[in-house]
Amino acid sequence: MSRIRSVATSAAMNRRTLLAATGAVTLSAGIGYALRPDSEAHAATTDTGESAVAVSRQAPAAPLAPYERGTTLESVAAPRSGSGDYKRLGDGPAWKRVVRGDLAAAKSGRADRRTALAAFVQFTDLHLIDVQHPLRLEYLRTGAANAWRPHEALTVAGAVSLVERVNALRGAPVTGSPLHFVMTTGDNTDNNSKTELDWFLKVMSGGRISPNSGDPRHYEGVQNSGLKLYWQPDAALRDADKQRGFPHLHGFLAAAIREVRSPGLGLPWYSTVGNHDALPLGCYRHGDSFLAEFAVGGKKLMTLPASASVALRAAIKNDKDPKGLQLRDLLKTHARQLRSVTPDESRAPFTPAQYLKAHLDPAHTGPGPIGHGYSPANLAAGTQYYAFRISDDIIGISIDTTDPGGHYMGSIGTTQLRWLDKTLSDNKDSYAIVFSHHTSKSMTNRRTDPAHPSDKRHGGEDVVATLAKHRNVLAWVNGHTHKNEIIAHSAPNHGSFWEINTASHVDFPHLARIIEVVDNKDGTLSLFTTLIESAAPHRTDFSDLSQTGLAALYRELAFNAPGRNTELAGASRDRNTELVLKKA
């Protein structure tokens, strides 16, 4: 029988521990402040543990017992039948837990000694997509089949189903202790569009969402364009995807833009910014008036010669067009091929300041905290990084790895890197978990920030070196690559830590990750990672176009997306794991 002590049920529990158990303690605001969100006076302070926010909803009471139900330890969606290239999904075999001793040996008997320190959920790369947005690059599919996904119209329904899964969890699957919070590690939106930002905040905090823009009466986009290049679900047209086995689903598009209701998370949640949140289309810097006006206008390009598609995609991939000048010229060149759509001002790109203001809007507070990590101090300073207290023993640090100069790869400025170093030093008596969008491998973009040209940019190796200086760092949790990968970073001074990269919720296998931290009481700590899918059933019913039915279909269409990367689930060592560390 495991003797697991939950941080929320300890007999020695004090006020700060109680707040930590609900994820309700704010450490700081990202520029050296510890903020009290219910006060107008945001004074600098070295007391980083007593700034609290109200929690309006709680996760279900959790028994102190391990469980597997509702996780990939029980079952994972897998192909079961189908004709041609299109496969139907069903219940597949579970993914077992793998113990990794890369950084420390796993000692026997530790299960009977464990003390639970923290437990939380990571969402990443939700990519809530306004599929009718005029600036979208669907036409790149003429050069590569995987440049457009047939399931993109269902991202909101899929994300709501993931929220429902978290709300139904009985706590942390290994320890049974309460989950403290949910952290999203970026690319919450797809096109840096105000429509998508509104949808994201309502998915997370609760509300009614109409995943539609432009004409409120019907869909206007590539999926009713009559072009064989795209899956035309409502039409009898023998398009390229139907030739691969995709179904004819009458009423699909009307259902896809129908109102969706999100219950909102029952846990506090925090937000980290990604390149698709910070930059138009995830790769272009702000400032081009033509592209900004095109985003809200009444014209949309839906097809392009393959040669032009390949050239534009190469320019994006190779960082040759950070300002979007080639895209602007392309749209002007193909003006005669533009199709008319309904203009919509709500599709406008949002700035970093607007992103912060939206998080701070009381309408989106949900279970808190106010601002979801961001604060008025962030808004005043123009920063999108902060720290917060996870529990008595652990702090969380959310960093901004997006590069305002353009391109989808990441980097970090000297000012922020020094802040990260100082925050870790100032909290050396607490363990630390760092959150970002980009991974160490994908922080290769050192383009100058136009607003801060003297602030040198740093890559992933500098972040790794900074984290390795501090023996209190346990993990760096991130996304961006859409692939599960867990990397052991070893340092000679015991500044070793785990980098936990989690697959997206837009590309199959549509995952999120639960992370638990335990003290093994033998000189080691363990981080348990458990992957979860949305609450939608694995099996789909083509006649079921309800909200739940669409969420199930979202997963199955993603599995069948032409040209999809089949390696995103990662190896078994990157999925459900126990990651052992020496105790600092």
Image: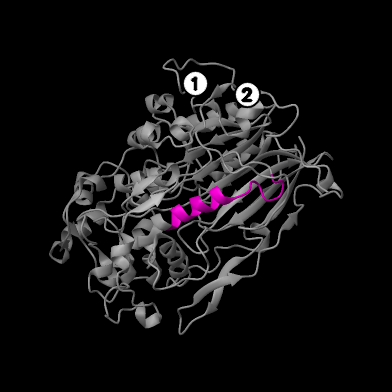
| In front: label 1 or label 2 | 1
Q: Amino acid at mark 2?
A: Asp
- Image quadrant in which you'd find residue 582: top right
Q: Secondary structure at mark 1?
A: loop
What residue is shown at x 29% (from left), y 66% (from top)?
A: 253
Determine contact: label 1, label 2, CB under 8 Å.
Answer: no
Taking depth in this image into account, of 549 and 211 the one nearest to the observer is 549
- Please state, as top left, top right, bottom left or bottom right, where the C terminus lies in the image: top right
Q: Residues within 10 Å of mark 1 (few under 14, many from 20)?
A: many
Disc 1 from disc 2: Cα separation: 19 Å
- Residues rendered magenta in the picture: 158-176
Q: Residues within 10 Å of mark 2 (few under 14, many from 20)?
A: few
Res 304 visible: no
Image position of 207 (left or right of 440): left
Taking depth in this image into account, of 249 and 155 the one nearest to the observer is 249
Residue 398 percent across, percent down from the top left: 52, 37
Q: Residue furthest right?
A: 108
Q: Secondary structure at mark 2?
A: helix
Image position of 567 (left or right of 74): left
Indicate which disc, 1 or 2, sits on the residue closer to the N terminus: 1
Residue 140 percent across, percent down from the top left: 32, 66
Residue at label 2?
A: 426
Taking depth in this image into account, of 185 and 81 the one nearest to the observer is 81
Residue at label 1?
A: 36
Q: Amino acid at mark 1?
A: Arg
